[in-house]
Amino acid sequence: MLERRRVCRYLLLLVVTAAFAPDSLSQVPPGSSPAQSAHSSQSSQKATHSESSLDAGAISNGVYRNKNFGLACKIPEGWVLRTDEMNARDESNPTAEPSGTDPSKSAPTAAPSEAAKVLLAAFSRPPEAKGEDVNSSILIAAESVSAYPGLKEAGQYFEPLTEVAKAQGFLVDEEPYEYALGAKTLVRGDFHKDVGTRVMRQSTLVMLARGYAVSITVIGGTEDEVEELVDGLSFDAGAKKSK
């Protein structure tokens, strides 16, 4: 069993906040800019805090790229970015349990640091735009493996993730399995949650690279939508090798 010094904080955040439009993110922290479309007039922008030693990656022409991890992710046209807002959330109540289907009421929070960070948070609609369907999303996070003594393989990261997901009402579609994206092999886990007449589907892909556990979570209302988002991921075979 993987020893943990803390709960899988970032993946818990992803699981409970990405289901529907997260109202709690509509309050932009002081000094932050409002959410921007992934296809804004800017040709390139930093995805999140650049001062950290953890490479935040950058977005250009609707594609998020992180050279250190060799990762690229297409962001659907018209989606909004909430990366800075998710990293800036107050850590005043990190163990709160979400209420009902609205994760914004008491969602756990995250503490940005050099050891853990949300690298990309992209949603199909902004929090102020209400909708009946699932607010599809892509969330990429990196957390230092030092937070999990004994973590040697990506599959082990699903132990705390699955525990947290089940606690929030998610069901496991199947046990984590190896999933190839080009020349890169990750470990993937699929979940779903019934919310009234709707079904939220989530797939999380995990890899260990350069001393970090990197998780890529996509959420959609149908299996086809989830697979389309996964298909937007790619890896550069010539990227820096993991250390």
Image (cartoon, helix red, strand yellow):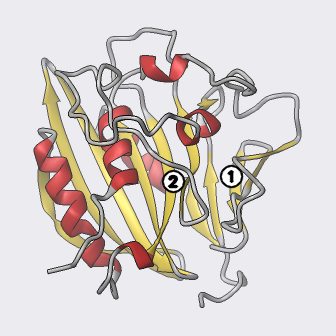
Rendered residue at 36%/23% (across/down): 20
Pick out the residue farthest to the front: 92
Answer with left or right where residue 70 lies relative to residue 157. right
Q: Is residue 34 above or below residue 191?
A: above
Q: Nearer the viewer, residue 38 or 2?
A: 2
Helix, strand or loop at label 1? It is: strand
Residue under pointer 2: 140
Assess disc 1: are there few (<14), some (14-19) or many (≥20) residues with their C-alpha within 10 Å of its C-alpha. many
Using the rendered view, name the quadrant where residue 222 is placed: top left
Rendered residue at 60%/29% (across/down): 79
Quadrant location of the N terminus in the rendered image: bottom left
Q: Which mark is residue 36?
A: none
Answer with left or right where residue 238 lies relative to residue 232. right
Q: Are marks 1 and 2 in contact (CB under 8 Å)?
A: yes
Q: Is residue 91 above or below residue 51?
A: above
Q: Residue 182: image x %, image y %?
A: 53, 76
Can the viewer see residue 94 in this picture? yes
Please report whichever mark, 1 or 2, sits nearer to the chain's N-terminal start: 1
Closest to the camera, between mark 1 and mark 2, is 2
Answer with left or right where residue 235 lies relative to residue 222. right
Can the viewer see residue 180 in this picture? no
Q: Nearer the viewer, residue 173 or 224?
A: 173
Quadrant location of the C terminus in the rendered image: bottom right
Q: How many marks?
A: 2
Using the rendered view, name the quadrant where residue 221 is placed: top left
Q: CA distance from mark 1 to mark 2?
A: 10 Å
Residue under pointer 1: 64
Rendered residue at 19%/68% (across/down): 159
Q: Residue 122: image x %, image y %?
A: 56, 37
Q: Residue 8: image x %, image y %?
A: 31, 58
Q: Residue 47: image x %, image y %?
A: 71, 47
Q: Disc 2 marks which amino acid?
A: Ile
